[in-house]
Image (cartoon, helix red, strand yellow):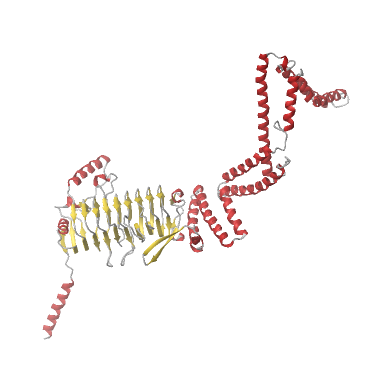
Amino acid sequence: MKILFFSLFFLFSFQIFAQKTENRRKMTFAQFVKEAQECKGEVYQLSNADIQISSQDQYRFSLEYVGRLSQEQETKKNNVLKSFVDSLPKIVFPKPINLYQVNFLPDLNDYQTGIIFLKCIFEKSLAFYDCNVNHFVFVACHFKGLLLFLNEKENPNKIHNIQVGTNDPNESKFEKCILEQGLRTEIANNKTNIRIFNIISKGIVDLNYSGGAGGMGMLGDIEIWKSTFSYPEKNTQTIRLLGIWAMDANRLLISDSKFEDTKTRNHGLFLTGRYKGISLKNNILDVNLHTYRLTVEDDFIVENNQFNKKFSPSDGESLKFDLYSTNISWNQISGKLTTDKTIFNERGDSLVIYEARSDLELANEDDYKRLLALYGRFYTLYKNRIDMQSANACRIEIKNIETRKSAYDYRQTHTLKAYLDWKMNVFLHDFSDYGTDYVKSMIYALQVIAFFAVFYFFFPSQEDNLSKNRFMRFFNKAIEYFKTDKQLTEFQQEQKEEELRKIAHFKENLLASQNQIPKIVFWLGRPFYESVFAYNRFVIWLLQSSDFVKGTWQNLRKSQKLLLSFWVSVYFLSFVLVGLLMRIINAIAMSLNFFTTLGYGEIQAQGISKYLAVVEGAIGWFLLTVFSASLVSQLLQ
């Protein structure tokens, strides 16, 4: 009896064990394609299968790696490949395809091969759940449903490489892959690479490497080239045209791609996680670039991108990058730097961007300080790179935010101090860009000097040719010269009479005292008065030579009058121009003197200019103080 019982127990146990034994199906890739195409049900579903490329279909569905080729060999290879691809018919999959724990195995005879979906049209979704793939490539495919890679069990996906599109720059020969419902991955193995080239996405693309169940989310390289991301449907919730979620990844490259405006508040391009390096080059973003707890350990390169919306880290302190290996040109993100947060409500989640502009935003001290902290990281970055132009531009935006905050504080308190704080910031912005541009402050000061010089021009403190008295004397002498037979030498002698008298007295005194004084005094004094007399004799000779009026104006011939009228006009014009020039020089000299000496310089103002001098002096003292501070600040930098 015991033997019979033991035998039954053994057989029952064996049956239970046999039921738990996994029976995996073996099939070729061509068989898989045929089954998926001819499926009669609503969904084609395949579980626990091993799919392998056979020798019969390796040229249609396998990818063979080729070593480095010369340019001639590469061209020949591409031409042959194009002819081959053009000759192939399209493969249409009409039903949704769900694959569970399916192993796609390469040709056992060639360990370098992978699996390629070439010229395939997926009318519905294509989903890989807990599958094992060495290398997947999608070329010239059209995905009308969602392309999904998902890890559901604790055993992570073993997908080492996924390529959507091809990486040859001349991709026109392969057309493009189209993702009408987007792409989603959740892969948790350690070295998965994702490469996306020349695709058009009309849905949400989520590359999720957060680890899934039991995974650590470690990743290889992510490369996205020459692709277009859009979302044509209207949606009030947060839309991620491209979201990359990585706990730990190698390098991320997004280049020559376009992210089209979704007409909604959105993340647009969303990056989170830890990366060894990130490179964003030559992209057009009509959406926000949003980061959340993003850490870049090595190179962080952002070059030649067009940011038409916002560059918006959710928290300034959580964006971390190396100050020595980061290169983000400020002209790309100038005026675009914000922080944001996601608000959840009954209609779903939506993105709220903080720019410190409205009173409601300025009242939020925590968000205000986070935004300044974010700007501070970039300011430190540019100073560390000795890129003072970008650092100063960043500082100007920081001070603009503080100016908006001071204006808000004044509207709340209406105190004199708050008002002066606000207006001082406004003045510093206009005068020197908050102390970052001493040349601008110098130009501003010169404008003030020129402004006051205009007043001093019309209210002179010194006599010149345009002065009333001197102008009258000049015309009276001219009338006397033409009306009488008086010569130019006589006018000269009358004008220099006092000077000539003093020189004559000096000569007489020197000659009379030559025996009573040291010889050196006589020897030095004699050349002095002789040079003065020589100069006066030269002036008299010159006047005599140029004196055309011998007698009165009425006694001159007609031809003499015409010639003399011309020279008189030139002389009168020169008199006025010299007066005008001296008036301008004196006005500028007065303005410059009063500006730099608080109105108490050597030049004395008269009349209304005396009061203007005090005002200009006070302004000059203040502006020169700010200019000096700006100059010292720039010199220290």
Residue 232: x and y, percent? 31, 55
Residue 508: x and y, percent? 85, 23
- Image label count: 0
| Image quadrant where one finds the N terminus | bottom left
Residue 609 visible? The answer is yes
Front residue of 41 and 386: 41
Residue 215: x and y, percent? 31, 65
Q: Residue at x 61, y 56 (%)?
A: 420
Residue 531 visible? The answer is no
Above or below 23: residue 126: above
Which residue is the extreme one toward the bottom? 1
Front residue of 118 and 77: 118
Above or below 44: residue 440: above
Residue 40: x and y, percent? 14, 61
Residue 287 falls left or right of residue 419: left
Residue 521 falls left or right of residue 568: right
Front residue of 432 and 476: 476
Residue 504 falls left or right of residue 15: right
Front residue of 427 and 209: 427
Residue 494 falls left or right of residue 331: right
Q: Residue at x 14, y 82 (%)?
A: 6
